[in-house]
Image (spheres, rainbow, N blue to C red):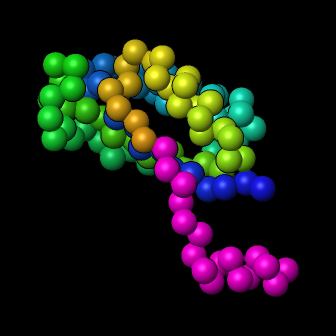
């Protein structure tokens, strides 16, 4: 049974756009390697961080929506931790609205 997840990714702000795209491509490949399906990718742009992380006061935010089995996020986290240009990330399970659940159960 697949679950819906959202990944918020903060990359270093001082890297080039091509390097940032490479990081996003790597993240997408990791998700797809765990048999996940990419939904959408939103770039929120460069923003000031709440506190300094690795001597950086700004970061580039991206949000990736995907679906996968419940065991995949742990594997995805392990691989993202090894990426040098990632400052922080968070994967959380999206709550399915009750009306959507009922519709799925009726089908």
Q: How many marks?
A: 0
Q: Is residue 107 above or below residue 23?
A: below
* Quarter of the image where the N terminus is located: bottom right
| Image spot of residue 88 (x, y percent) | 35, 32
Highlighted range, magenta: 91-107
Q: Residue 87, relative to residue 49: is it above or below?
A: above
Residue 26 appears at what percent x and percent y? 56, 24
**Percent coordinates x, y for residue 56 in the rendering:** 18, 24
Q: Is residue 50 left or right of residue 80?
A: left
Residue 74 lies in what quarter of the image? top right
Quadrant that contains the C terminus:
bottom right
Does 52 sit left or right of 6 as displayed?
left
**Residue 84's image quarter?**
top left
Along the horizontal axis of the image, is 88 left or right of 28?
left
Q: Assess whether residue 95 is covered by the magenta stretch.
A: yes
Q: Residue furthest right?
A: 107
Residue sitting at 68 percent across and 41 percent down? 71
Q: Is 105 contained in the magenta span?
A: yes
Q: From the viewer's perspective, is residue 16 above or below residue 37?
A: above
């Amino acid at each position: 049974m697949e679950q819906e997840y959202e990944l918020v990714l903060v990359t270093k702000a001082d890297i080039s756009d091509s390097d940032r795209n490479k990081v996003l491509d790597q993240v997408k490949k990791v998700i797809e390697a765990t048999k996940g399906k990419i939904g959408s990718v939103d770039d929120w742009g460069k923003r000031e961080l709440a506190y300094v992380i690795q001597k950086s006061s700004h970061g580039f935010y991206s949000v990736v929506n995907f679906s996968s089995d419940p065991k995949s996020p742990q594997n995805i986290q392990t691989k993202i931790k090894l990426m040098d240009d990632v400052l922080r990330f968070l994967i959380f399970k999206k709550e399915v609205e009750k009306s959507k659940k009922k519709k799925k159960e009726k089908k």
